[in-house]
Image (cartoon, rainbow, N blue to C red):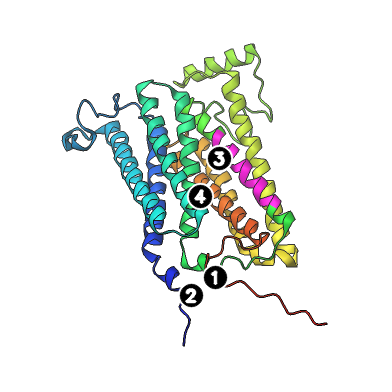
Amino acid sequence: MRQTTTSPVRSAWGIHAWTVATLLCTFVLLWSGGIVTSKGVGMSVPDWPTTYGYNMFLFPLSGWVGGIFYEHSHRLIASGVGLMTMILAAWLLAVEKRRWVRNLGFAAFLMVCVQGLLGGLRVSLFKDEIGIFHGMLAQSFFCVVGILAIATSAKFQRRGWDSFIPDTALRNLVVATTALVFVQLGIGATMRHEHAGLAIPDFPLAYGKILPDTSPEAISAINERRIADDQVPTNAPFIWVQMAHRFVAVAILALAAAVAWRALSNPIARGAARWAVAWLAMVVAQVLLGAWTIWSNKAADVATLHMALGALTLQVGVVFSFRLWRANQSLRFAIPDFPATPEPARTA
């Protein structure tokens, strides 16, 4: 008779589907937030939690015009993601047997609550700096929900994700690259929310040089030209923030190439080759989108696509790191009632 050890896995398809739906809606939320920032309409609705004095959910459709449409839509999508996360956390607490998954679900719920509060404070206090933390917490939340989507899948619970052979060097490379991607997203968020995105209008050079001159005299001359071209004046810190963004991009590209080389050249790590090559392709595309953002004079759609691909690049890095880390563990995240492999009997 066929054993029924996988019946708990099969019965969990509903929570997995809900988690995946939450993940997809979170990506839509990130995209809408990117549009709000790229179009510079973050303060189109000046009050919170109301919308021009209306209950957020009762704001009349006739008022959904211009920047209000993007900002108000972002709020409604965020509210939907918050509700979906609350249901997900409660569902996990009710049916999930693995403590680490329950804890991660509860952490996701706390993160989405803080995320909503930061978004509201960004409007109420009129502080661009809060928007930086708001954006970075959104990226972190997206990754947490991504791990939950994997952990609730039938393949994961049947140990289908434990096929990678341990490779400590590859794992360390992937973790380091992922950490640098997170730092890069933080620099990008700083550029967007401090409105420093086009502090340098040319690429690959910076004001015609490899390293720009940011002396007071040079900044004064730069701003004279920018004002003549109807551009917002800049300053040395903004220029060097963008230069840091470029330097880190080069470092990420080099590390992603090293990950792909390690996975392709080391027979032990060959099982991770497809992940490594796909990740490298995403990083290359991200670099090209960054250049296109500058060449297009920061076109809103291009800048938003650049931000969205950055979020996906981080997500892949986190999942890749998680999978390689599991390969170095003793399968302690397996299904609780999964039968342990018996030790071989000793002979006298």
Secondary structure beneath dot 2 equals loop
The answer for how far apart the CA atoms under marks 3 and 4 are is 18 Å
- Quarter residue 200 falls in: top right
Q: Are marks 2 and 1 in contact (CB under 8 Å)?
A: yes
* Residue 340, visible in the rendered structure: yes
The answer for how far apart the CA atoms under marks 2 and 4 are is 34 Å
Q: Are marks 1 and 3 in contact (CB under 8 Å)?
A: no
Residue at 66% from the left image edge and 41% from the top image edge: 250
Q: Compared to 213, does 182 lie above or below?
A: below
The quadrant of the rendering that contains the C terminus is bottom right
Residue that numbered label 2 is attached to: 5
**In magenta segment, residue 185:** yes
Q: Nearer the viewer, mark 3 or mark 4?
A: 4
* Residue 39, visible in the rendered structure: no
Secondary structure beneath dot 3 equals helix
315 to the left or right of 169: left
Whichever of labels 1 and 3 marks the residue nearer the N terminus, that label is 3
Secondary structure beneath dot 4 equals helix
The answer for how far apart the CA atoms under marks 1 and 3 are is 50 Å
Q: Position of residue 224 (x, y in %)?
A: 53, 14
Residue that numbered label 4 is attached to: 312
The answer for how far apart the CA atoms under marks 2 and 1 are is 7 Å
Q: Are marks 1 and 4 in contact (CB under 8 Å)?
A: no
Nearest the viewer among 140 and 248 is 140
Label 1 Cα neighbours within 10 Å, binned few <14 / some 14-19 / many ≥20:
few
Residue that numbered label 3 is attached to: 291
Determine the residue located farthest toward the bottom in the rendered image: 1
Secondary structure beneath dot 1 equals loop
Write the start and end of the magenta stretch as one range.
Answer: 172-186
Residue that numbered label 1 is attached to: 338
- Quarter residue 167 falls in: bottom right
